[in-house]
Amino acid sequence: MAVMTMRDALNRALREELARDENVFLMGEEVAEYQGAYKVTRGLLDEFGPKRVIDTPITELGFAGLGVGAAMAGLRPIVEFMTFNFSILATDQIINSAAKMLYMSGGQFKIPIVFRGPGGSAYQVSSQHSQALESWYAYFPGLKVVMPSTPADAKGLLKSSIRDDDPVIFIEQERMYGMKGEVPEDADFTIPLGVADIKREGADATIVARSLMVPLALQAADELEKQGVSCEVIDPRTIRPLDINTIVESVKKTNRVVVAEESHPFAGVGAEISTEITERAFDYLDAPVKRVSGADVPMPYAKNLEKLALPGVEQIVAAVREVSYLN
Amino acid sequence: MATQVVMPKLSPTMEEGQLSRWLKKEGDKVSMGEPLAEIDTDKATMEMQALSNGVLRKILINEGESAPLGQPIAIIGEADEDISELLKHAQAAKPEKSAAAPARLPSDTAPAVEVHTSKDQREQTKSPISTVSEDGRKTEETAAGGRVLISPIAARMAADAGISLSALRGSGPSGRIVKRDVEEAIGSKAKPAALRAVTSTRGAARQAVYEPSAYRDEPLSEMRRTIARRLVTSLGPVPHFFLTTEIDMERAADLRRSLNEIDPELKVSINDVIIKVVAAALIQHPQVNASFRDKTLRYYEHADIGVAVATENGLITPIIRSADLKSLSDIAIEARELATRARARKLKPEEYTGATFSVSNLGMFGIDEFTAVINPPEGAILAIGAMAPKPVARDNQLVIRQTMRVTMSCDHRVVDGAVGAQFLQTFKKILENPLYLFV
């Protein structure tokens, strides 16, 4: 085990997989010469050369399509979006080609591609550059959606995503690149997709959180512990396929759930999780499932408004108290 | 938003409440469902819960003061909110001291309650507030308009534990019954159950016997209607008549003594024996276990016996539900527990409303015999005098026997003379030979 940032853990995963399989290659804006807008791809051009680590023009739809074609031809592309905000331009290739090709070709073409990059809220970059898009991609059958919340998870999940034969949307949280944690150095360390992780065990309420909300949920759980409420924090890690069983088992134990997410509430992943819980564990609920979400507005630029638009520890604490009837 | 807290209806017959004690001070934070004050109603001291979150901004009546139902007594709002408008409203809503309380129907002056079959019971709502509607029926108010609000897990736990939803008080929003309410109910139920287990072996029939008795309504016959109308005009709203008999209590006293020798913990009293015998006699004479309704006579399946308890503040009649199904030891334990809570004014309204028959005992005051006033809508009440050794003739010999005189007051609209006499005959027969209880 070594302590490293999430940025370096991702870099390690990329390096190990590039080394492990020569069909793996990386492309995106500034990934090679500039070593990545967020330095996730640092050193990879030097190590693997310009045929494996490729700078692209600023043409998201174009290089996403190039990636899908390469995957159909048998390679395993990793496509970096400088941020997922720009993936919006590439959605036709992601949704209409990558997600559906296996189905539409009657199983002839698998698409082993990873679209990765930072997503979610960032610091003061305003409405167009600070948003959570996971519910978009999770909506489509054919895509897998992964969101790590620790450096170790980031490494293990990215390696599994690269080895997976289906297209994977791998969303890193921009604010978390500098987060440090222990990371296994074993080149065979992987974390299977579709398996949730219980980040903290508890008895009175379940907080389902992903990505940036996980550390906040853990802080909220600490605070609630002082108030006599024992919280279980579950990180699904993979949004699709969703490990609903782990969540349901937790709900059966605690009878109360809060889903914390930084995305907008309407038609979000939290809404899906809430419905799944109601369908599968209705008889175990002591209170309606409560969501803590980002505000239902475009992200404001002003620092004070940005703060108000994002859910924090306080809101999670208040929501848990509400479902526990402590307010 | 700031809201007014108004004097709530905490018992079926309450018209005004006296503020016994504020449990929060002005400026204190309050949460929905949290106890706000203790209110003295006509029957008991009850906790009043806050129905909104916020800060107790203003207390409008002091401890010791009374307010009619619906009068604002406090204001809850945000700490920094402007409440001057609400304050003005609240002051305007305060009635003149001389204003008379709203007139009530005569039937409302007595604790009347509609009783239900167990099935109906499930449909009943539970909320912090009960009311009596125009026809004297008990209804329950909730924000959801009469539905039971209960979380799924709480409903399941209550069903598994055999706890009636009507026995639960919801502490969640709008009175929703939540898991902790059921857990508390299970906790409090577990204690007496353990105690009973020592003294009683019968368990199967017990589950339902804390419910009010089931009943059937029969239309009034023309004759019955005429009797009712004529008697009411002659002797007040409830036409009483009285039947007295003297009972040889030797064997009942022996039974009691033997039981208490077997288990001194039991402390069965003569009154407990009387309750059991009354219940047994009522089941044999269902015409007496009945009440007069405007258009029907209501016959109860079980004997829910009201037991008059004198308290510092006056008379209250906690109820032994389905005494016909309960063992003497059950009755003894329950009667003692109810009487203790009655004296502490801690009875819940459903624990003292809706008996099918009552027993009043002044024997401990040395009263030989007296007549008791019926507690409407019950059909009759039995007044018990003191048990004392007296000379009586047996087989033409003068002997000293423990005797007791009882007087039954009957509502003539329900019970005719002969019917009451036959009931009393059965009562006397069983009490003089309690072995009848076991055949």
Image: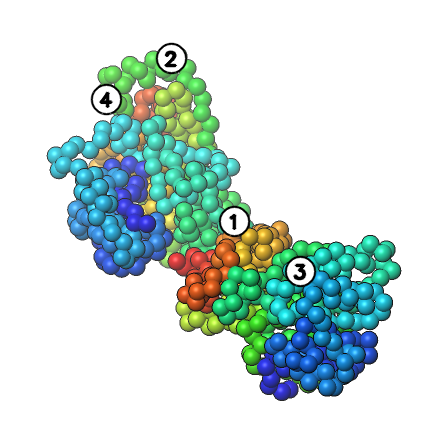
The chain carrying label 1 is B
Q: Secondary structure at mark 3?
A: helix
Residue under pointer 2? B223
Point out the frontmost of discs 2 and 3.
3
The vertical placement of A251 against B336, above or below, is below
Callout 3 touching callout 1 (CB < 8 Å): no
> How much space separates mark 1 and mark 2, taking CA atoms?
47 Å
At label 2, the amino acid type is Met
- Residue B335 position, x and y percent, is 35, 47
Pointer 4 chain: B
Q: Secondary structure at mark 2?
A: helix
Residue in the image at 22% along x and 57% along y:
B26
Q: Earlier in the sequence, mark 4 or mark 1?
A: 1
Q: What amino acid type should be assigned to the residue bearing mark 4?
A: Gly
Same chain for the residues at labels 2 and 4, yes or no? yes
Image position, residue A209 (x, y; %):
56, 65
Question: What residue is at 51 percent from the left and 44 percent from the top?
Answer: B205
Q: Are marks 4 and 1 in contact (CB under 8 Å)?
A: no
As drawn, is B118 to the left or to the right of B384?
A: right
Give me the disc on residue A89: 3
Choose between B151 and B253: the one closer to the eye: B151
- From this viewpoint, is residue A321 visible? yes
Mark 2 to mark 4 CA distance (whole Å):
20 Å
Q: Is residue B134 left or right of residue B83?
A: right
Q: Who comes first in sequence, dot 2 or dot 4?
A: 2
Q: Determine the image quadrant of residue B319.
A: top left
**Label 1: which residue?**
B155
Q: CA distance from mark 4 to mark 3?
A: 89 Å
Give the residue displayed 72% in from the left and 57% down from the top.
Answer: A92
* Residue placed furthest toward the left: B98
